[in-house]
């Protein structure tokens, strides 16, 4: 069993900052990429940022220069969000591509989501 647990969402004024955290736990052999997605009302879930096991990062154009993704060796991934805008309001989901055992293929896992609301 693998779990991803997010924390750090909340309500913030435009221009403010938040830091999201996600911790992976359970039977994990290796974590490949980790990332953050978001979904706002009436829209499809979209990639916000991702980071490979080697540290390479990828960002959506809409957050470049404002958001920073990082990860540690303890199965955690973080998203620092600065200069937040009302259009950043969404439920943010943690995602990880995880190998549970040397004999198994990698699979994608999702957290339960954390709400980020940016007021104007």
Image: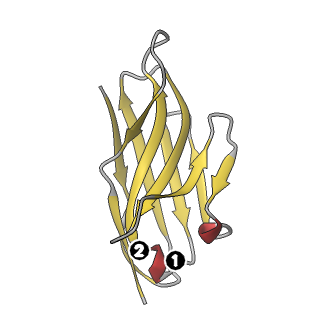
On-image quarter of the C terminus: bottom left
Residue 12 position in % (x across, y down)? 40, 78
Label pair 1/2, CB-CB below 8 angstroms: no
Q: Which numbered mark, 1 or 2, is in the foreground of this view?
A: 2
Residue 84 drawn at (x, y percent): 52, 77
| Side of 103 relative to 91 (left or right) | right
Are there few (<14), some (14-19), or many (20+) residues within 10 Å of tag 2? many
User: Earlier along the polypeptide chain: callout 1 or callout 2?
Assistant: 1
* Residue at x 49%, y 11% (from the top left corner): 102
Q: Is residue 75 above or below residue 10?
A: above
Q: CA distance from mark 1 to mark 2?
A: 9 Å
Residue 89, quarter of the rendered image: bottom left
The image shows residue 7, relative to residue 62, as above or below, that is above
Asked whether 115 or 62 is in front, the reply is 62
Q: Is residue 108 above or below residue 30?
A: below
| Front one among 60 and 120 | 60
Q: Mark 2 sits on what residue?
A: 89
Name the element at disc 2. Answer: loop
Residue 60 horizontal/vertical position (percent): 61, 62
Which labelled disc corresponds to residue 84?
Answer: 1
For the rendered model, the colour scheme is secondary structure
Question: For the view shown, which residue lies furthest in the bottom direction?
Answer: 120
Q: On the image, which quarter does residue 42 sit in?
A: bottom left
> Residue 94 bears which disc, if any?
none
Residue appearing at x 56%, y 43% in the figure:
71
Residue in front for this viewpoint, 61 or 52? 61
């Amino acid at each position: 069993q693998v779990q991803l647990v997010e924390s750090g969402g909340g309500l913030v004024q435009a221009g403010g900052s938040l830091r999201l955290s996600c911790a992976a736990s359970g039977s994990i052999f290796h974590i490949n990429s980790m990332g953050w997605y978001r979904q706002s009302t009436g829209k499809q879930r979209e990639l916000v940022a991702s980071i490979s096991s080697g540290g390479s990062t990828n960002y959506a154009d809409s957050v470049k220069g404002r958001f920073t993704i990082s990860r540690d060796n303890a199965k955690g991934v973080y998203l620092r969000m600065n200069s937040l805008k009302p259009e950043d309001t969404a439920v943010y989901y943690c995602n990880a591509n995880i190998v549970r055992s040397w004999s198994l293929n990698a699979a994608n896992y999702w957290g339960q989501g954390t709400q980020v609301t940016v007021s104007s």
